[in-house]
Every structure is written in C-alpha cells, then in structure tokens.
Amino acid sequence: MPESRLQRLANLKIGTPQQLRRTSIIGTIGPKTNSCEAITALRKAGLNIIRLNFSHGSREFHQSVIENAMKSEQQFPGRPLAIALDTKGPEIRTGRTSNDQDFHIPIDHQMIFTTDAKFENNSNDKIMYIDYAHLTKVIVPGKFIYVDDGILSFKVLQIIDESNLRVQAVNSGYISSRKGVNLPNTAVDLPPLSSKDMDDLRFGVRNGINMVFASFIRTPEDVLTIRKALGLEGQDIKIISKIENQQGLDNFDEILQVTDGVMIARGDLGIEILAPEVLAIQKKLIAKCNLAGKPVICATQMLESMTYNPRPTRAEVSDVGNAVLDGADCVMLSGETAKGDYPVNAVNTMAATALIAESTIAHLALYDDLRDATPKPTSTTETVAAAATAAILEQDGKAIVVLSTTGNTARLLSKYRPSCPIILVTRHARTARIAHLYRGVFPFVYEPKRLDDWAEDVHRRLKFGVEMARSFGMVENGDTVVSIQGFRGGVGHSNTLRVSTVGEEF
C-alpha cells in the first residue's frame, strides 16, 4: 500500500525538508526592483519568472526591465529566467469626476450610471459615466455593480433608457476618477484584446517574451484571438489564461482545452464571487490543470503584508503553503516585489514556505491518483514519462535527466509529480525559459556544438545533466538516476528510458 497523506504527515521530520524547491516563483518588477542588481538579488533569493505588468508603466519602462534582466542573466550561465507579459485586458472603468475630486457616497444613496459620453469627464455623485456602451443591455434590476475593487457596491434599481440606469449604494464610501467596475454574474461582451493590448503584444513579440498572462479570459475564443494576434513570430509564446470572473469559470473546461496554462487571479475573482467560494474554486481549477498536465499559477495577495513589513502573517504563509499543496506549479508576487520595501525578503519567504510545503507531499499516492485519472491510451512520450516517475519511486531515484528540444517531455514528467528533481537539458534557451512554468523542472542550456555521432552527443548531454545535478546537490556518487532521450534527433522521439548509477555511467 502506498503511503497515505495522513501517514506522510504523521511521520514528518520537522526542520529537515528536501534540499531544492520545485515550485516556481513569479515576481512582478516595478520601479523599486528595476535594476540589474535588484533582479540579480531576486534571482539569488529564488525568482524564476519575471512579470511585466502592462496595466502600469510605459513600454520604455518595460523595455528597461527586459534589458536589466538580460544583463543579470550573464551571472547565471546556462540558467536563463523567463519573462512574462501580463496584459491590461478589457476593463470597465468609471469616468473622470469634475476636477478629479472624490465624492462621498452614503449608504442608500441613489444616483445615475450612464454611458452617455458627455459625462465622461464631468461625473459626480449624482451621475457617473461608465465606459461600457452595452451596460444597459446586459444588466437587469436586482443585479449588483462593484466599483473600485468592490469597495463600493451598488444595486441596480431601474433601467431608465438605453444610456442610463438608476442604482442605490449598498454601503458608504468614496467614488473618484477612473476606478475599475465589476459586473458580477453578468455576461459581458467585451473583446479579449484592446488596441493597447495589441500594441503591447507586438512589443512583447519583438522583445522575445516567453509567455503572456492574458487578462479577463472569458471564452476559448478569447484564447484563440490572442494566439492569432501573436502571429507566426510569436507562435512559441505560451498563453496563460487568467481566470478572474464568472464567465471564465463557466467556460473553464473549454478554455483549458486551448490554453497553454492557467492563472487563478484571485483578486478580481474574489470581487465577483464570495471569498469562501474562491477557496474551493482554487482547489478545483488546480486539480483540473494537474489532470490535464497544464501549468497553473496561483496569484494575488499571497504575501501582501510584506509590501511594507519584513515578516509575513501566519495566514499568508499558510496561503502560500496550501497553494503548493493544492498542486500549483507557480506562485506569484505582485506589489510585494513591484513596489514593496522588502522584495528580497518576500521571495525568500515564499521560497522557504514552498520548500517546506513540498516536503509534506505523499508522492506515491499522488502518482497513483494522476496515473489512474489519465485516459488511456496515452502518447508514447507520456507513457515514458509515467514510467520514469514509477521507476524513481520504486528505485528511490534522486533525479530524472531529460533531453528535450521543445520541453514537452519535461512538461509531461512534471504532470506526474515525481519525488525528485527533473533536470531538463536543452540546446534552446527559449525551451529552458518556458520550463520554469512546470513544477519540479530545473532547466539547463547545453551550449556545445552538436556532434555527428548521435550516441556520443546523447551521452555528453546526459553527463552534463548529471554534472549540473551534482553541482546543485541533487545527486552524489551511488545515487540512482533515470534518463529519457530519443532514439534519434528531432521533436517527438523521446521514447528511451534508462536507469543508471551516478559515478559509474556518468
């Protein structure tokens, strides 16, 4: 019988976790961390993926982040980090108030929300412009409208005409210029990309970004629209669909079929859905991604208090740890690293928390769950990946070394959550960067020129992978390692599995 989760927890050796963290850390770069020195410090603390938040900052700013990241990379030869572009996405916002002043809205206060453009720059506490032309067509009396991340809530009382509706404040607060608007449980028909988003994507393609965090994905067609916008030059860029509204949840299964990965954006999601339900939704979506073998990111307010404090709350530590236990491939920091006073502390805290959380996982029971839930027959590559994971568990192996061109074999290995690191050896820096999306994968770029002797070239790459694993303390002489490679060059031929002993064959 495999060790159950309860048995694993009861037998934990506190204070002696595994050596290397397998969950990737994403950090948003802002003014406080946009330097080669700051990015290097974040990398040393454990950062794997840089996030460029295009809701803020100019393209010139984001260009400088990319340049600083590339300079920092020179200090980590063969170990490139990934760069993600987070789109602003289609948003609904209030208009500008008169003189940009704040207006106090008392509870039960009634006012007009309008789509009439003459109030776009002249809104007040009696009539407020909303920049969504179809507002009166999609909403009905009794529904709610949230303003400023839900700080103010309004109930719709009456649709007056095609441009105006009457609302009543559910709570008191202040309303001001250009605040975000949410329409919970209302199907909206906004396009997946604004003109700004299109320009930002073109910028990203030109600058070699590795993944797009696509905001407010509602339908699978939204993902396909973004794929088309990336064009031929951006065909290798991974699309990570951000699920942050009810429509995205309703269409999640269809979205999962066409997207490369998922981000659970709990901020906006928590505005439209009750907070306790977000807990269950997080677990459900992560499980679906795990079963599909697609990477999933947990984001928003994970270590929020560390923006201005050197230590996290106990609740935040539990939040990060539980995201790891749920099965997240990556966890993300936003303001903590973009504008916070303690960005390196935040990454260190997240890394330490993830490491300890990972040590509590009952890998054999998890593998059995994933294997049993996977539809058969599987592809040859997935069959080999599952067999490699089983071999590691049965042989008490310490590492899997995989040679890959696209990284697909490493992704499938990650799906089965082996109890050891996955060493990805590739000649392609882009493949190495994207591999940071997959839990447990440690990518290394192999730079020597390809040999004419295929068998010798394979041996040298495998030896390089074992040497990298040894240098990071993953393996030592006498340890068992499993390797996967193809019988010939090219994509899709990873079908050869070998069990070896460190120090004898490598």
Image (tube, rainbow, N blue to C red):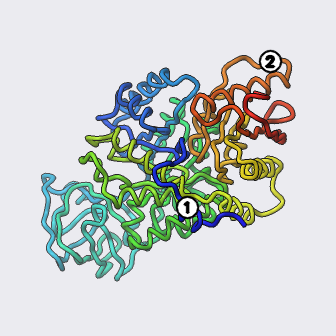
Residue 109, horizontal then vertical, whole percent: 17, 77
With 294 as the anchor, is 172 left or right in this view? left
Determine the residue positioned at 39% across, 31% down: 39
Report the amino acid beneath label 2. Answer: Leu
Residue 30 in which image quadrant:
top left
Q: Visible in this render: residue 280?
A: yes
With 79 as the anchor, is 501 left or right in this view? right
Report the amino acid beneath label 1. Answer: Asn
Check whether the beta carbons of the residues at disc 2 and disc 1 lie within 8 A of each other: no
Secondary structure type for disc 2? loop
Please identify the quadrant where the C terminus is shown. Answer: top right
Q: Is residue 483 above or below residue 382?
A: above
Determine the residue positioned at 43% across, 51% down: 353
Residue 75, horizontal then vertical, whole percent: 48, 22
Q: Visible in this render: residue 233?
A: no
Q: Which one is nearer the viewer's eye here, 147 or 160?
A: 147
Residue 335, horizontal then vertical, whole percent: 32, 46
Residue 11: mark in rendering: 1
Q: Is residue 137 above or below residue 210?
A: below
What whole-number distance in Å separates the C-alpha atoms at marks 2 and 1?
Answer: 49 Å
Q: Is residue 206 above or below residue 231?
A: above
Viewer-nearest of labels 2 and 1? 1
Q: Earlier in the sequence, mark 2 or mark 1?
A: 1
Residue 365, horizontal then vertical, whole percent: 67, 63
Q: Which one is nearer the viewer's eye here, 164 or 67?
A: 67
Q: Which residue is mark 2?
A: 451
Determine the residue positioned at 63% across, 66% down: 4
With 252 as the anchor, is 465 left or right in this view? right
Within 10 Å of the Cα at label 2, are there few (<14), some (14-19), or many (20+) other Cα atoms? few
